[in-house]
Amino acid sequence: MRSRGRWLHEGLETLAENGAAALTIEALSVRLGLSKGSFYHHFKGMADYRRALLEYFEERENEEFIVRADAAALPPGEARLRGVVDDVMRAEGGRPRLEHAVRTWAADDAEAREYLDRIDRDRVDFAQTQFEAMGLEAAAAADFAQIAHLMSIGARATVPPQTPAQLRALWDRLIRAAAACAATDAGS
C-alpha cells in the first residue's frame, strides 16, 4: 500500500478505535512509523487530511458497495438489495465502531456532517431504487428505504451492537415485508 493510502487506512483504524480526537499527526506518525514529513508530503495539514479521510471513508464504505452492486449480474430489486447486504456483511462484519465514530465526529464537525449527509442520502437512494424495482410505489419504497437505513444505524449503535447474523436476519425480514407489500399493492 502506498504511503498516502497507509495514512488514510490508519486514520480509519484510529478513528474506529479512539474517535476523531485521536486523529493527530503525532499519533498517526507513531502508529505508522513514518515521519511528519511523510504526512506533509501527502497532505497540506490536518484539515486537508481530515477531508481526505472523509473522502476515503465515503469511497470505501459507501461508493464501492453501490458500484459493485450496480455492476453485478443481479437484477435490480430484491436480488441486488440482498447482494449489497451480503457484500457489506462480508466486507465489514458490521464494523460498528467505525460507523459510530464517523457519526460521532459528524455530530460536532460541519464538514464531517456534510460528508455523512451525502453518504446517508446515497444509501437511502440506492435502497429506495431497489424497493421500487421490487414493485413498491415511490412513497412506500421511500419509507422502506428509510426504515432500512435507520435499522442499519440503530443495529450498529446498540450495546452490544447487533451481530452480522442478527442484522442479516433483520434485513431478510424487512425485504420479505417489502415484497409482501409490493405483492399486495400489485393485487389491488
Image: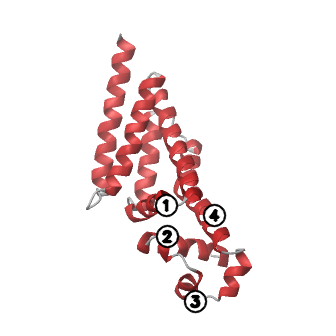
Q: Are marks 2 and 1 in contact (CB under 8 Å)?
A: yes
Instruction: Point out the residue furthest to the top here.
Output: 188
- Mark before the other along the chain sequence, 3 or 2: 2
State the count of labels: 4
Up/down of 167 relative to 3, above or below? above
Q: Which mark is residue 20?
A: 2
Mark 3: few/some/many CA within 10 Å (<14, 14-19, 20+): few
Secondary element at image label 1: helix
| Camera-nearest residue between 135 and 39 | 39
Instruction: Kindly identify which numbered label has been placed on residue 33.
Output: 3
Locate residue 76, reporting x and y percent: 51, 34
Residue 64 in sight here = no
| Residue pointed to by mark 4 | 51
Labels 3 and 2 touching (C-beta < 8 A): no
SS at mark 3 in the image: loop
Depth check: give the residue in front, 44 or 66.
Answer: 44
In contact (CB < 8 Å): disc 1 and disc 3: no
**Mark 2 falls on what kind of element?**
helix
Residue 35 falls in image quadrant: bottom right
| Foreground tag (1 vs 4) | 1
Amino acid type, residue under disc 2 in the picture = Ala
How far is the residue under mark 1 from the one under mark 4? 15 Å
Query: In whole angstroms, how far apart are the C-alphas of marks 1 and 3?
Result: 30 Å
For the residue carrying disc 1, how many other residues have a C-alpha within 10 Å: few (<14), some (14-19), or many (20+)?
few
Q: Which residue is mark 1?
A: 108
Image quarter of the C terminus:
top left
